[in-house]
Amino acid sequence: MENYSVKADGNGAIDVNGQVSPVTYTVSLRQGKGQSYEIDIRLMAPRDWLLQRGFERDAVLVSQGGARIPVYHDGVNHHDKGRLDPVAAISIELTARDDSCISEDDLMRKFPELDGAGIG
């Protein structure tokens, strides 16, 4: 059972087909059993910027700590085999879930924006 939830904002970059742009994102952390952690990542990206770079469903977030994290758009505004629809909302939410951190040290290395957020 999850014990608590912590949120922090980070500054990184979004990479779509090798084209990169600065982006802010939110990291939400929940501690599971033992030293396991579940991290949810959310960011908003401009629809037109994504479409101009050939975005279909996924991109890569380069986090503040340098980790490369695949992020996905799970919305219903798709056509042509899952490609983002040009009439979708002007800002598109991209999300990811990461459960690879198995210690607080590992967590802080991967997500330094959580430092000082009351973990532990």
Image (cartoon, grey):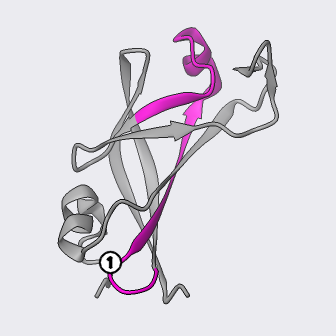
In the image, the segment drawn in magenta is 32-60
Relative placement, left or right, of 45 versus 37 is right
Figure label count: 1
Which residue is the site of mark 1? 117
Rendered position, 46 above or below 3: above
Mark 1: which secondary structure? loop
Q: Which residue sits at x=32%, y=84%?
A: 118
Q: In the image, what residue type sits under mark 1?
A: Ala
Q: Position of residue 52 (x, y in %)?
A: 57, 10
Tell me: residue 119, above or below residue 100. Answer: below
Q: Residue at x 36, y 15 (%)?
A: 18
At x 52% / y 12%, what residue is drawn?
53
Residue 6 x/y as whole percent? 44, 77
Task: From the top left corner, tell me how far across and down residue 11 is, in percent.
Answer: 33, 47
Instruction: Look at 64% across and 36% down and name the residue there.
Output: 73
Q: Answer left or right for 95 relative to 111.
A: right
Q: Is residue 80 magenta?
A: no
